[in-house]
Amino acid sequence: MEMKLLALVAALTVMIYTPGSQAKPISLVERCYCRSTVNSLPRGYIRELRFIHSPNCPFQVIAKLKTNKEVCLNPEIRWLQQYLKNAINKMKKSKQGI
């Protein structure tokens, strides 16, 4: 009986002190960054915008505020749609000039 207990303790010790894999579990990899979005946020509060698109998640917009807080914006916000349209037009014009 003592031998089984000793083997169990040894196995648990090895499992505890063995470093885990650096890869994230599949359930965490497939999660979307934005679980909820803000529908109204004045542009003056925003320091920078990040856009994320992945196969598992819809188009996501993350706004970093001047307070260093990050919030997810609804991509359907009117001013954000206009911002994206202007950015795309600007990119098209710069490609035509090359």
Image: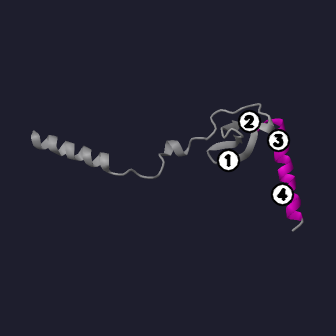
Task: Tell me the crowding category of disc 2: few under 14, some 14 to 19, or many 20 or more residues within 10 angstroms, Cα based.
Answer: some
User: Pointer 1: what residue?
Assistant: 52
Bounds of the magenta segment: 74-96
Q: Position of residue 37 (x, y in %)?
A: 69, 33
Left or right of residue 13, residue 71 in this image:
right
Which corner quadrant of the image does residue 16 belong to? top left
What residue is at 64 percent from the left and 38 percent from the top? 34
Magenta-span inclusion, residue 35: no
User: Pointer 3: what residue?
Assistant: 81
Q: Earlier in the sequence, mark 1 or mark 4?
A: 1
Question: Disc 3 residue type?
Answer: Gln
Q: Secondary structure at mark 1?
A: strand
Task: Tell me the crowding category of disc 1: few under 14, some 14 to 19, or many 20 or more residues within 10 angstroms, Cα based.
Answer: few
How far is disc 2 from disc 3 in space, using C-alphas?
10 Å
Q: Which mark is residue 74?
A: 2
User: Pointer 4: what residue?
Assistant: 91
Q: Secondary structure at mark 3?
A: helix
What residue is at 73 percent from the left and 45 percent from the top? 49
Q: Position of residue 71 (x, y in %)?
A: 67, 37
Quadrant location of the N terminus in the rendered image: top left
> Does the magenta stretch mainly form a helix, a strand or a loop?
helix
How far is disc 1 from disc 3 in space, using C-alphas?
15 Å
